[in-house]
Amino acid sequence: MSQSHILIVDDEPDIRNLISEILTDEGYQVSTAEGGHDANQQMQDKTPDLVLLDIWMPDIDGISLLKSWNQNHNMPFAVVMMSGHGTIETAIEATKMGAHDFVEKPISLAKLLQTIEQTLAANQGELGSNEMNQEWQVLEPIGSSTAIHELRTCIEKLSKTTTNTTFVGDSGTGKLTLALWLHQQRYQNQQAAVIIDSLTLNDANIDKVLADNYQQLIQHSQSGSFILTNIDCLTSGLQNKLLIHLKQWQKPHQQNPVQLLSTTHQDIKVMVNNDEFNRELYEFVAEFTVPVCTLSERAEDVPELLNFYVNFMPDQEQTPYRKLSFAAQNHLRNYGWPGNLRELKNLVRQLQLQPGDAEIQLDEVIELLEQTQQAQSNSSQSTRYDLELREAREEFERDYFLYHLQQVEGKVGDLAKISGMERTNLYRKLRALNINPKSKDKS
């Protein structure tokens, strides 16, 4: 489910409570404010991703709030105005002042949810251009295994080329980190890069997001890298639009063309053969494909990775420094790591934050792993009738998609037809339910 944070600002408690319940049920993080002063106070503690803002309120009207938030034209969140029938013109005017959209009262649930989803997706895409100016923490692949040695050698060779490259591997294997490292090796921080998640793109925003980010990339440094994650999630329509932009960016003999780096969970060549991915686009984006292995396939790197993050976390996140005993490292070396590098990093963080001696002992590691496995087991064994409605619905959806993925042999295009879902939304749903179509048999 989406973890975007939405702030509802309205002086009517019935409306606040109703919208809050609906959005919470949809999986959003929700907070409410009864007026402008309350909203400003809450924003000092946490910046929302989106604000639903009423126009008429006793203390500060919504238009004045919008002006104050957007006075430098760089609001760090999106705003959707809520207006009664008599204030539609005012709401339209507010969109010229920085609001993304408006919804009319009495509020239609379908319209509200659609507006929120589209606004969040558009805003995330627009914010992608700001990422080209930030300092990324680019990490070289860690480990001494044959797989990592071959990966380093491959990327070093690619760094001397302008080849469009796709990284393919399971969730949590570090594909985006590798793409960033390739970008750094190519340009040595002399050129910019922008990261865009394919799941934030839709038919309404893709042209604007791609064009705006391309222009800013060129203006910033004349060339650089476009890093497009989850490229396997693009619908056929979005694939066609991306192809049009790529042809413009990489015309023959064009000086300083932008390079495309992408990540995917699925083998795009297989998707092409299943008519799920545009063959011409594949030839553009996957001039070279880098397979990224799972952590279990390079288990000999686990001790080195554990020691790296034991030192890295206190420096970067100010967690308490606690090193792992040799027995604990040996146990984790033989653990399966279904969540790959991401799971390892999260485990180190949890262990360091737990109370205990300076050295993390084996029994502490075993206890934490058992707690995690027990929680997963309890979740799978409990009946849906024992769960809250939202959790029960997620359990049913997971069973539903796993069943049909098995029937269609993992073909997401066929699953989209069966479920009646648009493919980008389907991919988003599968990600939220932690379902990897490529690993349907293991699921």
Image (tube, rainbow, N blue to C red):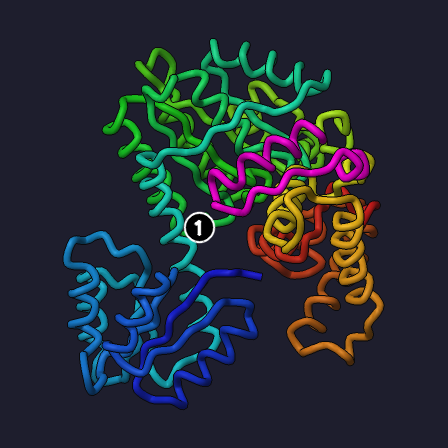
- Would residue 86 appear left or right of 312 to someone viewing this image? left
Residue 23 in view (yes/no): yes
Q: Where is residue 406 in the image (x, y as percent from the top left)?
A: 82, 50
Residue that appears at 26% across and 70% down? 40
Look at mark 1 in the image and give the residue it sits on: 203
The magenta span reads 303-331
Q: How crowded is mark 1: few (under 14 residues within 10 Å), some or many (20 or more)?
A: few
* Residue under the point 71% across and 58% down: 418
Relative to 72, is 290 on the left or the right? right
Q: What element carries label 1?
A: loop
**Residue 408 visible here:** no
Q: Position of residue 287 (x, y in %)?
A: 56, 19
Task: Name the residue nearer the viewer: 202 or 51.
Answer: 51
Answer with left or right where residue 223 lies relative to residue 317. left
On the image, which quarter does residue 128 sit in?
top left
Residue 37 position (above or below residue 265) = below
The amino acid type, in three-letter code, at marker 1 is Asp
In the image, is residue 181 part of the stretch drawn in magenta?
Answer: no
Question: Number of numbered discs present?
Answer: 1
* Residue 40 vs residue 388, the one in the foreground: 40
Residue 245's image quarter?
top left
Residue 368 percent location from the top left of the image: 74, 53
Residue situated furthest front in the rendering: 357
> In the rendered image, which quarter is residue 420 located in?
bottom right
Q: Give the main secondary structure of the magenta stretch.
A: helix
Is 320 part of what is drawn in magenta?
A: yes
